[in-house]
């Protein structure tokens, strides 16, 4: 079959799978943040514990594995990235592609995606296991886990940060192919990298409670409501694109 003949066909297949699985991941991310969390907050304790017990584990199973497979297929795409006539599977990791603006753009999206993946597996899922276990225990007549509320808060902050990151992440994933070619200057990438690392690093550190803890406060006001998260996501996009690309990279 033509589609299995050489790296070009495999790259396309992984790209297709990457999109399909990515839709599942980001769709569930938005479901959790825009639908489930606000709905659970309006339920009484018994109904909420029952929903957490019956609904959350299933949704989180698809969520975390979709995150893993999205990242895996994305790495496979990068490994098969074509340039010239080279069909070697490692070509994408060794070619001059990374020195191009397209490479800069895709790395931006990829790094955001990998941070989001790590948040899922290292923060959201471990803390949600505590919340689920507590809901099941309380529903069975046991005592509430005093750590459950703090675990839920940690998971919430990481999940909302992922929703925030998803806005520029999806932008740069599509920007790479469809618009980054409009820029012809390769200067300013070091400055852009510094802006990216500092801004994204501070947002992630804040989500993890490394800056002032996990409690409500001015530093986390942008994570407290869904509208604030969406606004913050577009502000981050503006910083990365307008400052990073239009000003730093776009300036000869």
Image (cartoon, rainbow, N blue to C red):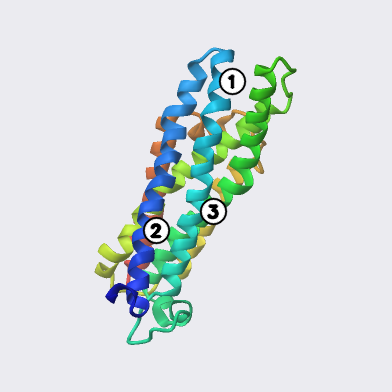
> Farthest front residue?
1
Determine which quarter of the picture holds residue 30: top left
Which residue is identified by label 2?
Answer: 18
Instruction: State the quadrant of the C terminus.
Output: bottom left
Whole-percent x and y of residue 93? 48, 77
Rendered view: 97 above or below 74: below
| Viewer-nearest of discs 3 and 1 | 1
Q: Residue at x 52, y 54 (%)?
A: 68
Q: Residue at x 45, y 62 (%)?
A: 73
Residue 148 appears in the figure: yes
In the foreground, 69 or 231: 69
* Mark 2 vs mark 1, CA separation in Å: 34 Å
Circles 3 and 2: CB atoms closer than 8 Å: no
Instruction: State the quadrant of the N terminus.
Output: bottom left
Rendered view: 167 above or below 9: above
For the residue labelled by badge 2, is the local secondary structure a helix, a strand or a loop? helix
Residue 192 appears in the figure: no
* Mark 3 vs mark 1, CA separation in Å: 30 Å
For the residue labelled by badge 3, is the local secondary structure a helix, a strand or a loop? helix
Count the marks. 3
Rendered view: 216 above or below 107: above
Q: In the drawing, what numbered circle is on residue 49?
A: 1
Q: Earlier in the sequence, mark 3 or mark 1?
A: 1
Q: In the drawing, what numbered circle is on residue 115?
A: 3
Question: Callout 3: 10 Å neighbours few (<14), some, many (20+)?
Answer: some
For the residue labelled by badge 1, is the local secondary structure a helix, a strand or a loop? helix
Question: Callout 1: 10 Å neighbours few (<14), some, many (20+)?
Answer: many
Q: Earlier in the sequence, mark 3 or mark 2?
A: 2
Q: In the drawing, what numbered circle is on residue 161?
A: none
């Amino acid at each position: 079959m033509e589609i299995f003949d050489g790296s070009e066909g495999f790259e396309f297949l992984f790209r297709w799978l990457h999109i399909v699985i990515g839709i599942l991941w980001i769709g569930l991310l938005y479901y959790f943040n825009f639908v489930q969390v606000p709905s659970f907050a309006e339920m009484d304790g018994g109904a909420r514990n029952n929903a957490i017990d019956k609904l959350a584990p299933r949704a989180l199973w698809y969520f975390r594995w979709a995150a893993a497979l999205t990242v895996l297929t994305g790495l496979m795409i990068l490994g098969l990235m074509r340039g010239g006539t080279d069909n070697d599977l490692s070509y994408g990791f060794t070619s001059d592609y990374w020195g191009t603006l397209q490479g800069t753009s895709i790395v931006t999206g990829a790094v955001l995606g990998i941070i989001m993946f790590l948040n899922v597996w290292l923060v959201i899922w471990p803390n949600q296991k505590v919340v689920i276990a507590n809901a099941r225990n309380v529903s069975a007549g046991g005592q509430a886990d005093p750590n459950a509320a703090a675990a839920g808060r940690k998971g919430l902050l990481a999940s909302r940060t992922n929703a925030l990151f998803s806005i520029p992440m999806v932008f740069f994933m599509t920007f790479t192919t469809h618009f980054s070619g409009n820029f012809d200057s390769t200067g300013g990438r070091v400055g852009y990298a510094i802006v990216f690392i500092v801004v994204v690093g501070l947002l992630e550190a804040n989500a993890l409670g490394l800056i002032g803890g996990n409690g409500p406060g001015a530093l986390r006001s942008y994570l407290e409501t869904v509208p604030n998260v969406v606004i913050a996501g577009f502000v981050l996009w503006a910083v990365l694109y307008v400052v990073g690309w239009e000003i730093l990279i776009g300036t000869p």
